[in-house]
Every structure is written in structure tokens, then in C-alpha cells.
Image (cartoon, grey):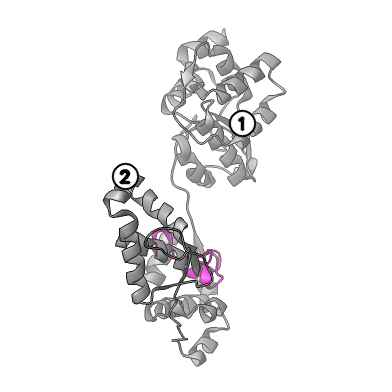
Amino acid sequence: MEKIIKKFLSEYKKKNKKRFEIQTLVKYIINNYKGEAFYLAGGGYIELYKQINLLKEKRYIKEIKSSSYNGYNPPLKTKWQIIYEESSSKWDKSKILQLSDYLDFSYYIKHPSYQTDLEWEYIKNIYGFLKSKEKREWASIEERSLELFYDEKFLKNKKEKYKGKYGILKRLNLSNEDLKMKKYGQMFIYWNKGVEHIKNIIILENHSTFFTYKRVAQAYGQIFGFNPDALIYGEGKKIEDSLSFIEEITDPAKVKILYFGDIDPEGLGIYYRLKEKYKDMNIQLQHEAYLHLIKLCKKEYYSERQNKNPLYLDVFIEEMKVYLENSQLKKIKSIWNNDLRVPQELINYEYLLKVRK
């Protein structure tokens, strides 16, 4: 229990919270024990009382005297305060001033706990880069991380949270652009029918449908009236991060992208987040494919527990409603409300050949 309580206090400190309630701590402990039975097996309230008093003796915490007692035996005050050690500025103020022509030190002045020797070394590296920035070339985040922090994964893996501030760049009010570094999109799997300038793309959520579409596109060109220059295998949610790689194969501002996935919270969620994240791209649903998918669904396919954000359904229906009959609209809402799904694999190669005739 001691470790769980210290973890609780550590999380509060990181959020710069000074006060907590005993009942909040008890809920946290039970949650970390994975249930009240394990909490009781770990000593329960008596062990909690013991640990609280030990922390009080070591001056990690103190009770708020104006608060009431919790009614248990032995009693504890309901409200407590974390004791923060006073920290003073560790860096030479004259050196801070010397570097202030390029850097903003206001966060470090307010939070001197971050004034460490290693942090100062990183800051000197950043300052040196900024002074020669005009002569430097753009690099990947990993390359710049290695140069400035001796670790290519530093900016991706070593995030520090303090009052909503994440990492050294936020503390210095710097952006990726300030350090001339770029986050390159992870490669996605795609098929190009052989055109130099890609204008029309379809993104498929699932692997099998990607290959079904590829067979049809190679043989006949059009799929539900749309002639794709390229097909992208979305790999489920992975496409949400990897779509930025599209810059490597075409001009994102000049391409039309259709998305086709499962009718379930995850499939609709992927589309919603793509639209939100890539607002400058022309991304739409492949309406005709969804109409066929709804017609093909004759039985109930149960959905595993997924995040049912109603916004996902609202955006889908808003875009599809002009193509849907009332019965189809009711069917989609019923599928959603009853935790069902419609897998896009219902549209297989044989079906696509049949509807072409």
C-alpha cells in the first residue's frame, strides 16, 4: 500500500495539486488493488491509517485542521495537504540573461525545480542551434533529438507533465518549426495503378477489402463509379497517423480521397478523426459503397466493446442522409444502438463483379 500512496502523491505533485481528500485516496488505492477484496487483504483501513501517520511524521503531508474527522476508528482528518519543499533558483541569473535574446525562461523562473544541470546543457544546445538556424537544413524530429539531446527518441518518449506543460520545448515556448524539424508520416501500404500524378484515392480500413478493390481496379478501373489512381490500406487506426505520408506520393491539396470502412464505432471513428486531423484534405465517405453495404447486411453481426462516441454516428449520418431512404437510416441507428456492426468484407470480389454487369 505504501507504494500506491506515494504514487498517488506523486501524481498530485505533478499536477501541482496541494490538497487531497482521504476518500479520494481510498478510491485510488482500491482501484490500484483491482478491487476492495485485495485492498482489505493488503491491510485495509488499518494499514492506510498507519501509512498516513508515517508520512505525517516524515513531513510529507499534514492534516488540514479545519476539516472534520472521517468517522472511522482510529479517526483520520478528511482533508490533507502535501508539503512541498521550497526550491530556489539554481541557475546563474546572468547566464539566463545572456541566452534570453533567443529563449523564453519565464517557465523556469516560476518553476525552479526544472533548473537542473542536464536541462541547462540541453538549453545551451538549443541556443547554439537557434543562433545558426538560418544556415541549417530541415531534419526529422529523430535527427534533431539526437543532435540536441543525445537521444533520437527524446522528444517522442520523454514527455514530462507539469501544470499542463509537456517537455522542454513547451517550457521554452518553442515549436518544431523553430528547430527546423519535421515529423515525417509513417509509411502506409498503397497501390498505384501507374499514374504519375495521383488525383483520386480510396482508403480501405481492412486488408482483405484492399486486395479486393485492387483486383477490380486493375481489371476494370472503376469501383462504384469512382476510378481510383491509388488505393491505401488504412490498417485500422494506423492511417490516422500515417496519412501525412501522402505528401510523399502526391499533392494533398489536389487529391480527392474516399474512405470506406466497417459500419461500427471504430470504423466511423476513424473517418471522423481523419476529417478532424486533416482538415486541408478533401476526404469524403465512399457513399455508394456504404449504400451497397447496408443493403447487403441481412443478419446481425455483433460488435466488440468499442468507444461509442455519438459524434462519429452524427458525422456519418449527416454526410450519408441525402443518399439514404428512411428505412436505411433507421437500420443504421438500430445497428449503432444495439451494439451491432456491418463488416465491409460483405462487399467481396464476386459481388463487385456482379454489380458491374
Near mark 1 (Cα within 10 A), the count class, few <14, some 14-19 or many ≥20, is some
> Which percent across, then down, holds residue 183?
48, 56
Residue type pointed to by label 1:
Leu
Q: Which secondary structure lies at badge 1?
A: helix
Q: Residue at x 54, y 25 (%)?
A: 263
Q: Say which quadrant the N terminus sits in.
A: bottom left
> Which percent across, then down, holds residue 83?
44, 75
> Which percent across, then down, holds residue 136?
49, 70
In front of the other: 225 or 26:
26
Near mark 2 (Cα within 10 A), the count class, few <14, some 14-19 or many ≥20, is few
Range of residues picked out in magenta: 153-178
Most extreme residue toward the bottom is 94
Q: Residue at x 51, y 90 (%)?
A: 93
> Which percent across, then down, holds residue 4?
34, 59
Is residue 166 visible in the rendered image? The answer is: no
> Residue 37 shows which numbered tag?
2
Q: Which of the two marks, 2 or 1, is nearer to us in this view?
A: 2
- Magenta stretch: includes residue 167: yes
- Residue 26's place in the image compared with 260, above or below, is below
- Residue 41's place in the image compared with 189, above or below, is below
Q: Earlier in the sequence, mark 2 or mark 1?
A: 2
Residue type pointed to by label 2:
Ala
In front of the other: 225 or 195:
225
In front of the other: 10 or 167:
10
> Residue 313 shows which numbered tag?
1
> Residue 72 shows which numbered tag?
none
Q: CA distance from mark 2 to mark 1?
A: 40 Å
Q: Say which quadrant the C terminus sits in.
A: top right
- Residue 185's place in the image compared with 238, above or below, is below
Q: Residue at x 40, y 66 (%)?
A: 10
